[in-house]
Amino acid sequence: MAISESDCPRLPQDLAFTIPLIMQGQELPQIILDLRSNKAYNWNSVTVLYDLTLSRDMITRVLTSLTLDNVDIAATASTIALMELTQNYSSIYNIHYVREVLTSLKWRNIGTNYLVMISIELVPLVMDISKNLKLVNTESQWLYIISNADLKNETNLDVIKHLKEGDNVAFVYNVTSSEENCKQGIQCHIEEVLDAFSRALESAILDEIDLAGQVSDEEWEAIRPTKSERRNFLLKSMKSYLSQNGECDNCTIWQMKAGDTWGREFLRNSSVLSVELLQVGYWKPREGPLMTDVLFPHVTHGFRGRRLSLAVVHNPPWQVIEVNNSSVTFRGMVADIVNELSKNLNFSYAVIPIGNTSSSKLNSDYDFNDISTYEIPDVIINLVRTRKVLMAASAFTISEKTKTLVNFTLPISTQTYTILAARPKELSRALLFMSPFTQSTWLSLLTAILLMGPILYLMNKFTPVYEYNGISVKGLSSIYNCIWYVYGALLQQGGMYLPYADSARIIIGSWWLVVLVLSTTYCGNLVAFLTFPNSDKPISTIEDVLNHPSLTWTIAQNSFFEEEAKTSNDPKYQELFKKSIKASINKQNMVQNIENGHHVYIDWKMRLQYMMKKQFLLKNTCGLALGKEEFCEERIGLILAKDNPYTEKINKEIKRLHQVGLIQKWLRDYLPKRDRCYKSRSTSAANNHTVNLDDMQGSFFVLFFGFLIGLFIIFVEKLLYKYQKKRSKSKSVQPFIT
């Protein structure tokens, strides 16, 4: 138990009992210090505004209370800006002076916390001007301490007029009674404290004696109260007795009220008063601050669990509305974001469906609606602008045209456009063995074989080496044999005979070197062609679309890119829009034309992925692919009113969701799941290939044609044999028998 001087920190209220001796009318520094001790506010910086109702000594004591640092109270207000507001009989002078002072505040440097100690006459003026200067918002905290008046009904209503949606404003005002029989002084407090202590001690002793008489000594030693339990009991009993029977300083009371402003304009019950003042506690010299709620309810509790209205358009997969009887189910990526916002800002929501809704589950969750996110329905704009809903919880394109009507949150996603085209088909593998060399290379190789045979023959025929050494030329004595020798060397088989002359050997050696280079190059290229199959030229960029001789294309109607291409100064986009098909076409027929390679479609990459997945589920084939070029980034955000005070608060939460990766995770969850077409989604994808029978069919064709040629030659040889046999038989002399 302690009785201290004024402006001293109290001992911890759960461990001790402290009574500061304060003269009536000098309570302000102690109130500020007690609120700091109870962590009613937590400010690292504060702007102090005061008028002439406070003396210089009082201002000094207030600053000491804001900066006092001891074991139990950490220094919180590390930056303090002190501004004086003078009060003059001329109201016009007051308005100009207060505006000038508040305009000079550099809130980016000194923070958004304000302690205003002024008379009741200046309160409406300061509230009005600070609101006009946009110093009052969801991030700022304004604490008004009014020492010269009570917020009675008429004053209460005048203050409420200046409280707006989204404000964080609290009031501490003096309701001290001026009765003459109010007791004060150190003697009064000592007598009351000792009286309360003696009564509490007597009650504790009697209870312990009564309990000890009912049990044995051993049991009493086990269950007897500890020192800490005795202290808590005595402290609780003393506070209870003094609150009911104490008379010292009972006339000095300061009330605490806070503006309940968040979310009231967006409630579905329009009869509710827009704002009101909540009783959050009171202060007495003996007890200190007794809080029934937090000093700034919305800073701690957000919207305080209010049920707000949201306008939602059915547009899978961003937002899906399912209406079953009287219940409305809201899901999708935007629903996940709204659920996180409602949890962090402490509100629940009621969905107002706009337009058509879905009564059944999506087809395997891979349907994508064709609703344009670029055109905002008028009913959405009207609901947002008239503040009948907190926001339109639907994904729409952030464009300069619509920014003149409504405001947008930070982008929840950025969608890019790309091309949906036919998946490049693999070229025929029948002549794969011819692919390593071009036609000119094969022609040059055939010419070299036909020329090397005669050259080798001539070298052997005209060299004098054979005649000089008396050696007969055997195998290479005919052009036919020389050509077969060169061909065998090309296949790395060689021949039965080698030339004896050095000149012919040099020719053969050079040919072998050529054969080595040719065979190595052919084998390496053949492996590459077997591993990476050749495909048709892909349609993967806008240039490919424009340069294709027979291709048609369509741009998604009522889309952001259609508008950009229409108004762009880029000749490429101008031509793309001018030659595109603008008439409505059947989606299924269009997809069929795309698979056949006659048409391409330009839209969001995400929407095209859904189209590919849906087509795969229908046909179980991978006939579509995406272009590798992504262009025209389109930002998607939620819609708010232009003067919505919670824009910064919501943007801050969306930014945090981006930083922790939740939005990216939710977006991946709603993208089509991977399937066997995943590796070939892009038209330019190159995948490893396992050699199969299609790759080797060319070698079997060569074998088959070689077999046919061999049969034909043996047939010709048989005919020649019969012809020569018949001819030789006709020339021979036959004996004449009579």
Image: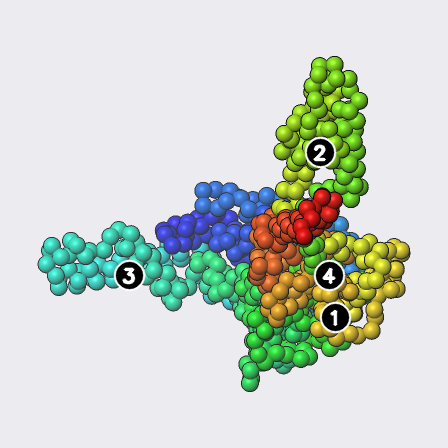
Q: Residues within 10 Å of mark 3 (few under 14, many from 20)?
A: some
Query: What's the amino acid at mark 1?
Result: Met
Q: Nearer the viewer, mark 2 or mark 4?
A: 2
Q: Nearer the viewer, mark 1 or mark 2?
A: 2
Query: What's the amino acid at mark 2?
Result: Asn
Q: Nearer the viewer, residue 656 or 153?
A: 656
Left or right of 675 in this view: 469 = right
The residue carrying mark 4 is 421
Left or right of 3 in this view: 502 = right
Q: Nearer the viewer, mark 3 or mark 4?
A: 4
- Residue at disc 2, secondary structure: helix
The residue carrying mark 3 is 199
Q: CA distance from mark 3 to mark 1?
A: 92 Å
Q: How is the image coloured?
A: rainbow
Q: Nearer the viewer, residue 124 or 300?
A: 300
Residue at horizontal 61%, vertical 71%? 618
First-in-chain label (4 vs 1):
4
Where's residue 505, x and y in %?
71, 22
Where's residue 589, x and y in %?
73, 73
Q: Nearer the viewer, residue 738 or 377?
A: 738
Residue at horizontal 63%, vertical 58%? 654
First-in-chain label (3 vs 4):
3
The residue carrying mark 2 is 481
Q: CA distance from mark 2 to mark 4?
A: 56 Å
Q: Is residue 74 visible?
A: yes
